[in-house]
Image (tube, helix red, strand yellow):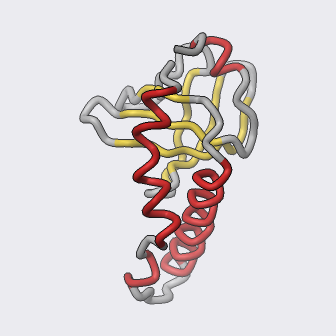
Amino acid sequence: MADRATALRNLAVVDMFHGRSPNGASLICLVTAIDENTICARRITTQEDLQFDRNSGIELGDVPSRIDCAAPFPPNVYDAFSSLDRSYRTLLQMERSGIEIDRTQARWTPEERRAFQLLDEHIAANAI
């Protein structure tokens, strides 16, 4: 198990990490900004902006989700989640602009499915 404080301090913009909400929901997040006390991130699957305490890894919101893995994802997993993030951002922007989107555009690619399959193993091997 990695040192929690060091793992959180080593996160940088464009890194990805995993968190878990109290109800067990998975939070795959992309770091969008960091300051001395806060990690700002976007949850890839929902495009929700979140903030986490940089010392504890606890979400600074109504639901105290917790960062449970800050180790870099393997390149193929990172690339798949990065692609998914771009796709979901584009679809969300279209929807906000009043453009009706075809929900089939949000389907996962085989690479994205594989990344989700590998996620639990990665988290277990790199838990903080």
Compared across the picture, whether 8 is left or right of 92 comes to: right
Give x and y (percent) for residue 56: 53, 15
Give x and y (percent) for residue 44: 52, 54
Query: For this rendering, which residue is in front, 44 or 34?
Result: 44
Would you identify the image quadrant in which residue 71 lies? Answer: top right
Question: Residue drawn at (61%, 65%), measured in percent from left and top?
Answer: 83
Residue 119 vertical position relative to residue 35 in the rendered view, above or below: below
Residue 94 vertical position relative to residue 3 in the rendered view, above or below: below
Query: For this rendering, which residue is in front, 79 or 49?
Result: 79
Residue reaching furthest left? 23
Question: Residue drawn at (61%, 42%), measured in percent from left and top?
Answer: 73
Total label count? 0
Question: Residue drawn at (58%, 15%), measured in percent from left and top?
Answer: 2
Question: Residue drawn at (63%, 21%), measured in percent from left and top?
Answer: 8
Would you identify the image quadrant in which residue 51 lies? Answer: top right
Give x and y (percent) for residue 15: 69, 41
Give x and y (percent) for residue 61: 43, 31
Compared across the picture, whether 71 is left or right of 48 comes to: right
Would you identify the image quadrant in which residue 17 lies? Answer: top right
